[in-house]
Amino acid sequence: MTHPDRARATAYRVLRDVTADGAFTNLALSAHLRGTGAQDAAFVTELVNGTARALGTLDAIIEAAAGRATSTLQPAVVDVLRLGAYQTLRMRVPPHAAVSSSVDLAGAQIGRRATGVVNAIMRRVVARAWDEWLDALTAGLDETDAMALRCQHPRWIVEAFAGLLPADELVPALEADNVPPTTTLAVRPGLMERDDLVTATGGEPTRFSPWGVTMVGDPGSLPAVRDARAGVQDEGSQLVALAASRAAANQPGPWLDLCAGPGGKAALLAGLAGFVVANEVRTHRARLVADNLHAFRRDAYQVVVADGTQPAWADGSFALVLADVPCTGLGALRRRPESRWRRQPADLETLVVLQAALLEAAWRSVRPGGVVAYATCSPHRQETAGVVVPFATRHRADILTAPAFLPEVPDCAAATDPRFVQLWPHRHGTDAMFLALLRRGK
């Protein structure tokens, strides 16, 4: 048996958790990197995230090098090859080191019989550079398939984005999904000033959100994060809460966060409203919500564990209802690298039914004259305008012009309907959050 270096062995175990057991990459990394030195942790994180992000393109390269489908290879062998290919083609690990370390890894983690096939395929993989492989593999493909392969996305996602963006923005949008996001924090209104967080982190204020700070390093080491005066939260998520609060500024509470986990938006609303109810269907996520809210006065919030489609409160109880509904997560592909390959078009059917049910529940929960904010971390037409427009027509809801509530954010009107907000990583540096604002008639 051979003995691969510890960092590559850790990367292999993380990737196996993701591909074989359905783990989320960030959670698997967190579990396996406890006690790992900073240099090894950085290497493992880049290797695993990059491999998970490029999975489909790497598989095409491996199949061309092997002369056979990856489905004919042992899944563990495929993961070794993916890691080896990514190292040499994208991390500039020397070819000989990528081959030898992959053979060692296969021998130690799978068995001696796997080393021969790994050695043979890896030698063919390292014979070409990344761009040379892409040129060879895209020859003869149509434009969409070629773009999908080069930009490391499934075709169906490329097609979905193509219907939402000008032609000259499609590749920049796909490429932005391949750039890991900067860590962004948000101060809790009333608990901490942003300038104090800037000083504590050495970071920079966000472009648009009045609460956000970008930083480098471990946010968990900050006292403000540990005591919940601030928390990790993408700027797009912050802007959704900002627009919703502005739309309901003349509507005194209580306010409701219908799908509150993990609690970032609920914490912003709690700092702005007299009282917020944070509802979450799953108990473990409700605990995260409570952790995010515990720095506020206990009479400023209530955490409820209930199915949002079957409200545990009377109709018309709230002046503002924020429904940030479960979705495909296509707007957060830069932070969830495995999602682009794990999600399938068929997932939309189930999700859209749930999204529509949650919007109905939000509408029942808001009082006359109140506002419902419907949000998703997905730009997909079926999950956004495809849910909101039929609902608004059926209920004769007043669709507010949401971009007007974010005047500081340029070019944020959705292509599907200019009354909706659609943020994009390549335009705004945020997740691709969608927001619609509906006012209920009196």
Image (spheres, grey):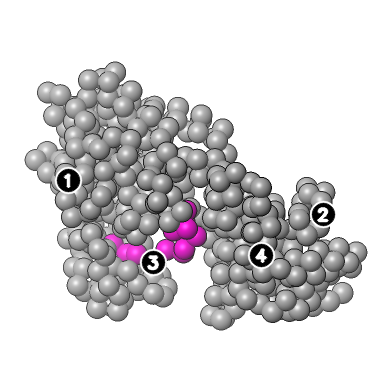
Query: Mark 2 belongs to which amino acid?
Result: Gly
Quarter of the image holding residue 375? top left
Residue at 38% in and 56% down: 425
SS of the residue under disc 2: loop
Query: Tag 2 or tag 1, which sits nearer the N-term?
Result: 2
Image-based side of 85 in relation to 322, left or right:
right
Of 256 and 357, nearer the camera is: 357
**Residue with the mark numbered 4:** 132
Looking at the rendered image, the disc whose residue lies closer to the viewer, 1 or 2, is 2
Stretch of the chain drawn in magenta: 174-187
The answer to whether residue 111 is above or below residue 288 is: below
Query: Tag 2 or tag 4, which sits nearer the N-term?
Result: 2
The answer to whether residue 177 is above or below residue 261 is: below
Q: For residue 95, which numbered disc appears in the image?
A: none
**Residue with the mark numbered 3:** 183
Q: CA distance from mark 2 to mark 3?
A: 41 Å
User: Horizontal and vertical percent for residue 250?
Assistant: 9, 40
Residue at 28% in and 35% down: 417
Looking at the rendered image, the disc whose residue lies closer to the viewer, 4 or 2, is 4
Residue at 80% in and 70% down: 123
Q: For residue 405, which numbered disc appears in the image?
A: 1
Q: Is residue 11 visible?
A: no
